[in-house]
Image (cartoon, rainbow, N blue to C red):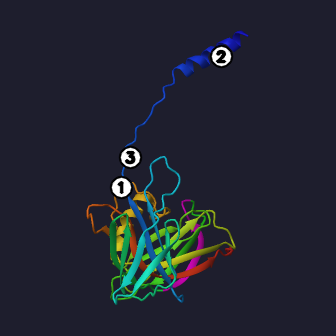
Amino acid sequence: MKKYLVLLGILTLLLGCIDIVEVDLEEAEPRLVVDAIMEWKKDSRGDEQTIFLSRTRGFFEDTPSPVSGAFVEVQNSNGIKFTFEEIQPGEYKTTEFEPELNEAYSLNIEVDGNTYVASEQMTPVVPIDFVDQSTEGGFSGEDIELRVFYTDVEGQENFYLFKLFSPFLAFPEFSIFDDEFSDGNRSFALFFDEDFEVGMQIPIQLHGISQDYFNFLQILLAQVGSAGGPFETQPATVRGNISNKNNSDELIFGYFGLSEVDEIIYTIQEQQID
């Protein structure tokens, strides 16, 4: 009984020392987030495209904040317009888009009395040449490593985005490259994962991107890491190419980009032991 009373007394003393601290976080005004990356896979029609609109959330909020009721339209240099219809809250889709390499497109979004605009070109991309696999990757030097090869076009400035879709990550892994030191040469992107297993199918994409999009991703990936989604919450301000015609000072998160994409599905092979 004495031990019980002593323990009860200690517990009471500890509980009496606990102070509840309430942190008063400043609530920033919700900002518009635009995910308007339009992709045209080689050997596909590219007519189906989707744009996502949302607003930033409070620190303790878990549920998304989609933006409904917006007017979303993309127009090419010939004045042909493609209207995106809202199919569910915050998701706008068209099935009539007409992709054309090196064509200039403009984005127009009207919502809550504001008009948001951006412009970009559909950037072509070279094909993926092949994938080389080894078991010398990672910090241990024993992880499965994939080297994805491509050949740059000589004599022109090119920018590339690689995406590898791992079954273990919610978002693809990203790598970006330019051809400043590899013009006209064969180069590769490197990926490795200790959890890759024989027989596993890994989608890998190579995107052609503009220099502006490359610069945007370079800053963004340096902040959030290559395994994060490009439109996740950012630790610092990263301004994309979308602006508010009514208020040029408004910061909009996201980017309007158009990329030709080459994709392969690579199957992890069993390594031969010499």
* Label 2, label 3: how far apart the Cα atoms are: 43 Å
Q: Is residue 4 left or right of residue 257?
A: right
Extent of the magenta region = 127-139
Identify the element where label 3 is drawn: loop
Query: Looking at the picture, how far across and down is residue 188, in whole percent?
Result: 47, 77
Tell me the mark number nearer the camera, choosing from 2 and 3.
Answer: 3
Q: Which mark is residue 236?
A: 1
Circle 2: residue type: Leu
User: Which residue is pictured at 40% across the width and 41% down the height?
Assistant: 25
Query: Looking at the picture, how far across and down is residue 246, in whole percent?
Result: 27, 66
Q: How many neighbours does mark 1 have within 10 angstroms: few (below 14), some (14-19), or many (20 or more)?
A: few
Q: Which residue is mark 2?
A: 7
Q: Which residue is mark 3?
A: 27
Q: Quadrant of the C terminus?
A: bottom right
Residue 242 visible from this viewpoint? no
Q: How many neighbours does mark 2 have within 10 angstroms: few (below 14), some (14-19), or many (20 or more)?
A: few
Q: Quadrant of the N terminus?
A: top right
Q: Nearer the viewer, residue 183 or 235?
A: 235
* Label 2, label 1: how far apart the Cα atoms are: 49 Å
User: Which residue is pictured at 36% across the width and 68% down the height?
Assistant: 216
Residue 265 visible from this viewpoint? yes
